Image (cartoon, rainbow, N blue to C red):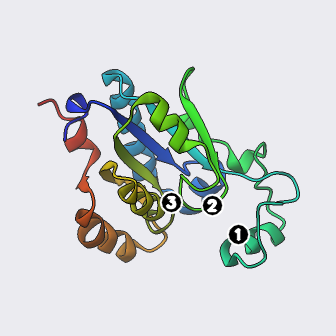
Amino acid sequence: MNVNDQVNAALLLMDFQNGVVERLGTPQTLAAAADALAAARAAGVPVIHVRVGFRPGYPEVSPANQSFSAIATSGADLSEGGPATQVHADLAPADGETVVVKRRVSAFTGSDLEVVLRAQGVRTLVLGGIATSGVVLSTLREAADRDYRLVVLADACADADPEVHRVLTEKVFPRQAEVTTVARWTAAS
């Protein structure tokens, strides 16, 4: 599927926030996401930036949640307004672009993403994000269960474990999504 052929589609750039990009991002992934962002804007495809953030004191974080409870007790500032949770400057939202704040791994959980998508009539989600085994996997699975058509931009995704990224993009994701590169997605038809 080509960016110019996408009707009722939106580009979701997920967890490209300062704290995540510093730990897991690569220059190549950031450049690919920036290329996807530019192409979506040029084609008039809506862009939705998704980031994770919490209220002060982390009232949304259960001690039973192994990942998030470790973050909440680490001393890191993952509050909604903190610098670590802001969208990276290379992918800064333009005026009118939606920023969704989520409270868990999936872009849907604890956010108003579904309301935004319904309001805009979006039926196809084009996904890029960090980490492939985190936000991308969780969002893809939930979106598939909600009957969205899915495209994953493999080179606009990154994971701490390159083998996990490879297995997901080559073996797991193709069962529920078209997996492509930013260059193929942005190519003129």
Question: Which residue: 34% across, 40% down?
Answer: 123
64 left or right of 107 in image: right
Callout 1–callout 2 Cβ contact below 8 Å: yes
**Camera-side residue of 61 and 170:** 61
| Helix, strand or loop under label 1 | helix
Task: Tell which circle, 3 or 1, labels the residue nearer the N-terminal end.
Answer: 1
Q: Crowdedness of circle 1 by 10 Å Cα count: few (<14), some, many (20+)?
A: some
Residue 104 shows which numbered tag?
2
Disc 1 target residue: 68
Q: Amino acid at mark 2?
A: Arg
- From this view, report whether residue 13 is shown above or below residue 110: above
Q: Which residue does the numbered mark 3 point to in the structure image?
A: 135
Disc 2 element: loop
The image shows residue 172 at horizontal and vertical percentages of: 29, 71
The kind of residue on which mark 1 rests is Phe
Q: Quadrant of residue 96?
A: top right
**Marks 1 and 2, Cα distance to the nearest angstrom?**
8 Å
**Amino acid type assigned to the residue bearing label 3 in the image:** Val
Q: Residue at x 75, y 73 (%)?
A: 69
